[in-house]
């Protein structure tokens, strides 16, 4: 009979077999015959301990009690020891003594150093009583303060820093929630430091021991002050634009609205902006007006950068709307449209008395000239705008009053007026007092019965405020674009910075799992690997949702085998289902075409998300994936994939929010119980819609959930025969091949070398691109593995030098922590043959080496 104790914890561990006690402790082991000789407990504890030992041997589960020790008190855990036949052969006792803080420095380092290395954020660790057991350097820069904090509570630290009582209460409340509800807690915190308001995003992450008790709590956070300030500025600018009575719209190069205020939608009779977002401006005009705008207005806009005038639009109810429109072309090709409904004013234009009243009282300047453009009359508005009285300007030409004589707009206005045509334009002028102001000039010839020009009617408006508003709008747009650019840069950097250490964590964990480990060690290693993979999934989800929001995610169209896609999903997830005792089955209806056109990668991603969720939320029962032909649509045939589970289901309120990003109902207990970011279903729905399909969910709480995916499909004209499955690569052919590994990160270098040498490859190491170029010039290698971001010389530059200066055609594989498609295309364009994203698996790396080394060697056969 072979008795194997578990790893010892802080304190003592003893084994009981028959009437023998084997005590294990750091000083060594000794054999005892009874509890008194064991020497751990006070005599009053002997009887209850013997009773508990008898219960465990009789079949009871692990028992945890607190007994009086010879010195102090401690917790004892009694559990059965099984022999090879599964019989209870003895009892293992583990005694953990209540220990004062601070812990010895060596134990602190052993417990937390790995966490501090892989999480690049402010980090602290607490025990279950909210006392500091570790403080990261990024959290507290002062080493003396860090040393003082060990063993202190959060309240004591806040008192040292004279922090506001609300900060203390907030931290303590979040910590209590984390402990009592046994879940991760996130919250925002506001601090005032040196008179400046700072915003922090903080989190508490509980960690449990093998018995399920809280072992310690990890606290981490980061500064979100800049994000908060940017959000505040954007909200204020948006409120200002929404308050303007004129319609304001932003259109992209394709002429589609991506922003418009309420006034703009209201002018055309729409209740909300959402009805017009993403729609073309042509939606608001009839065919004749569309043609006029495209042939007459757009050329002027392209030439001058702006255009102002009237257009005739069509409201939602079909009414004709005459608008006064000002268009400004932005440097990037987008368009600012400011419009005003002037339909009523134009319908009354022929009523002279009403017109005279309007002219006399309008704040706009009105000028009437003779056929030679000499001023006969101006209204009070003109005097208010320009500062000139009627007596001062009578008999003068209006152009003589404009001081900006070099303006191309003025030249165009005069030219049109001299030709007897309507004229209009906007220009920067100066009042009589020399004050600069932007004015809009619109002129209309008045004809006699014979069609001869006898007078001109000119309207002059002060548009200084509107011009300032346009400039503010441009600034706001540039700020939004800068924010989006910053977000893209942040995501790219985040992906790189996280994937680089993740590669080391996952790679070394994989190597560790290949060694001989105890059950507990293997459990810990598998947990690390699972957590790393979950983090990688979150990173990929965030990148996907960002690309979907920016409209940059592309859907491929290639020939794919539906049967293979479904079988691949079943193969990947069936182990997960087996672990939970859930039956996973796939049903493919007769008549389903084998080959269809679509994007197999994205369909696989959707199914892994949906089926994975079904397994996650199913405690017992089954998950069925059924694929069949859908109802024929007018445009073509459809495929319907239904995923049905017998899981916990959702109530009606939860179901309404299921497609929201970050799944707001995830704060509820049952969702937190199962984990996840809440991005899976929103991403899946967006991907299905990008594939021109739809995704629907039906669910009843306690009875399960059904997800229906309907996709249009096209059968290729020529159905290809199924390809023979490729034989598994023979990695023994790699033995003895030479590899140049170019990697500056010592951890990733170690991971790659372990993987390569385990396959029998000869590895040479260069720590930057410059060293790599020198080594390639001196030695021939079968293949080169090239990191991208390195000091001295990066991987892209080194690849160019190897190709262009050394004329070397050795296959080069990029090892990159960047996950964005445009980055990968850059590497291939630079001369690399392939790429592998970090973190990578050993089989992926060896498969790429086998592909390119064998392909290279085949050329010399």
Image: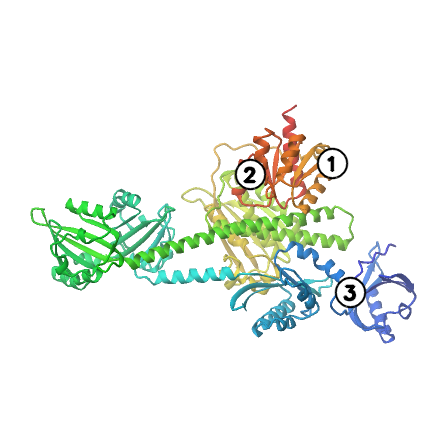
Q: On screen, 171 above or below 597?
A: below
Whether residue 758 sits left or right of residue 531 in the image: it is right
Q: Secondary structure at mark 3?
A: loop
Q: Secondary structure at mark 1?
A: loop
Whether residue 780 sits left or right of residue 805 in the image: it is right
- The image shows residue 806 at horizontal and vertical percentages of 60, 29
Query: Which image quadrant: the N terminus?
Result: bottom right
- The image shows residue 523 at horizontal and vertical percentages of 73, 54
Label 1, label 2: how far apart the Cα atoms are? 28 Å
Q: Earlier in the sequence, mark 3 or mark 2?
A: 3
Query: Which image quadrant: the C terminus?
Result: top right
Q: On screen, 162 above or below 314?
A: below
In the rendered picture of this protein, how many numbered marks are placed on residues?
Answer: 3
Q: Secondary structure at mark 2?
A: helix
Of residues 758 and 793, the one nearer the viewer is 793
* Residue for badge 1: 760
Whether residue 456 sits left or right of residue 640 in the image: it is left
The residue at the far front in this view is 434
Q: Earlier in the sequence, mark 1 or mark 2?
A: 1
Q: Earlier in the sequence, mark 3 or mark 1?
A: 3
- The image shows residue 515 at horizontal and vertical percentages of 76, 47
* Residue for badge 2: 827
Q: Does any portion of residue 726 appear in the rendered image?
A: no
Whether residue 326 sits left or right of residue 507 in the image: it is left
The residue at the far top in this view is 861
């Amino acid at each position: 009979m072979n008795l194997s104790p578990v790893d010892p914890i802080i304190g003592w561990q003893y084994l009981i077999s028959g009437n023998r006690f084997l005590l294990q402790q750091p000083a060594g082991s000794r054999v005892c015959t009874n509890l008194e000789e064991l020497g751990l407990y006070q005599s009053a504890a002997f009887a209850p301990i013997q009773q508990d030992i008898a219960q465990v041997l009789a079949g009871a589960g692990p028992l945890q009690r607190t007994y009086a020790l010879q010195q102090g008190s401690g917790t004892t855990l009694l559990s059965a020891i099984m022999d090879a036949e599964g019989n209870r052969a003895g009892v293992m006792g583990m005694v953990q003594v209540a220990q004062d803080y601070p812990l010895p420095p060596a134990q602190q380092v052993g417990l937390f150093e790995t966490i501090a290395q892989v999480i690049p954020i402010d980090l602290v660790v607490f025990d279950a009583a909210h006392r500091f057991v570790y403080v990261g350097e990024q959290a507290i820069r002062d080493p003396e303060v860090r040393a003082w904090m060990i063993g202190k509570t959060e309240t004591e630290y806040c008192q040292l820093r004279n922090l506001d009582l609300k900060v203390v209460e907030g931290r303590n409340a979040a910590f209590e929630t984390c402990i009592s509800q046994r879940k991760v807690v996130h919250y925002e915190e506001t601090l005032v430091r040196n008179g400046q308001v700072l915003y922090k995003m903080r989190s508490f992450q509980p960690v449990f021991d093998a018995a399920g008790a809280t072992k310690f709590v990890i606290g981490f956070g980061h500064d979100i002050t800049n994000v908060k300030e940017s959000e505040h500025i954007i909200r204020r600018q948006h409120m200002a634009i929404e308050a303007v009575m004129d319609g304001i719209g932003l259109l992209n190069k394709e002429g589609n609205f991506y922003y418009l205020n309420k006034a703009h939608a209201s002018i055309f009779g729409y209740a909300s902006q959402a009805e017009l977002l993403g729609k073309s401006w042509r939606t608001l005009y009839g065919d004749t007006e569309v043609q006029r705008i495209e042939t007459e207005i757009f050329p002027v806009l392209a030439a001058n950068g702006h255009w102002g005038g009237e257009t005739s639009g069509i409201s939602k109810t079909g009414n004709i709307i005459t608008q006064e429109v000002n268009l400004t072309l932005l440097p990037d090709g987008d368009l600012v449209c400011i419009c005003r409904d002037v339909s009523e004013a134009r319908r009354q234009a022929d009523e002279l008395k009403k017109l005279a009243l309007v002219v006399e009282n309008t704040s706009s300047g009105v000028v009437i000239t003779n056929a030679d453009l000499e001023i006969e009359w101006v209204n009070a508005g003109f005097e208010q705008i320009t500062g000139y009285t009627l007596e001062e300007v009578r008999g003068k030409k209006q152009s003589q009053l404009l001081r900006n004589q070099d303006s191309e707009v003025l030249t165009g206005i005069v030219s049109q007026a001299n030709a007897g045509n309507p004229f209009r334009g906007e220009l920067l002028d100066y009042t009589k007092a020399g004050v600069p102001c932007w004015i809009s000039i619109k002129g209309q010839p008045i004809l006699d019965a014979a069609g001869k020009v006898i007078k001109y009617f000119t309207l002059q408006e002060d548009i200084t405020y509107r011009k300032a508003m346009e400039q503010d709008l441009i600034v706001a747009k540039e700020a939004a674009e800068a924010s989006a650019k910053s977000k893209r840069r942040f995501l790219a950097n985040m992906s790189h910075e996280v994937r680089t250490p993740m590669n080391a964590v996952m790679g070394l964990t994989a190597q560790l799992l290949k060694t001989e480990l105890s059950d507990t060690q293997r459990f810990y290693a598998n947990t690390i690997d699972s957590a790393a993979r979950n983090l990688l999934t979150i990173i990929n989800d965030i990148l996907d949702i960002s690309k979907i929001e920016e409209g940059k995610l592309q859907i491929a169209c290639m020939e794919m085998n539906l049967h293979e896609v479904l079988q691949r999903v079943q193969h990947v997830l069936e182990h997960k289902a087996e672990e939970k005792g859930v039956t996973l089955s796939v049903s493919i209806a007769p008549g389903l075409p084998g080959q269809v056109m679509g994007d197999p990668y994205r369909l696989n991603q959707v199914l892994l998300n949906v089926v994975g969720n079904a397994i996650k939320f199913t405690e017992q029962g089954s998950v069925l994936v059924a694929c069949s032909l859908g109802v024929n649509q007018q445009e073509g045939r459809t495929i319907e994939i239904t995923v049905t589970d017998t899981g916990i289901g959702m109530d009606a309120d939860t179901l309404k929010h299921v497609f929201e990003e970050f799944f707001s109902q995830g704060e509820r207990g049952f969702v937190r119980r199962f984990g996840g970011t809440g991005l899976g279903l929103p991403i899946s729905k967006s991907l299905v819609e990008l594939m021109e399909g739809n995704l629907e969910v039906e669910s009843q709480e306690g009875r399960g959930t059904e997800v229906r995916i309907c996709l249009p499909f096209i059968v290729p004209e020529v159905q290809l025969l199924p390809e023979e499955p490729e034989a598994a690569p023979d990695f023994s052919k790699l033995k003895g091949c030479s590899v140049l590994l170019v990697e500056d990160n010592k951890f990733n270098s170690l991971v790659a070398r372990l993987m390569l040498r385990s396959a029998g490859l000869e590895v040479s190491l260069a720590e930057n691109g410059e060293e790599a170029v020198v080594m390639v010039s001196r030695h021939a290698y079968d293949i080169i593995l090239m990191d991208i971001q390195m000091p001295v010389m990066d991987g892209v530059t080194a690849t160019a030098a190897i190709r262009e200066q050394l004329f070397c055609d050795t296959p080069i594989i990029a090892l990159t922590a960047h996950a964005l498609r445009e980055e990968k295309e850059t590497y291939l364009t630079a001369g690399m043959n392939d790429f592998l994203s970090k973190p990578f698996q050993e089989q992926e790396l060896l498969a790429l080496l086998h592909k390119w080394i064998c392909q290279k060697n085949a050329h010399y056969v």
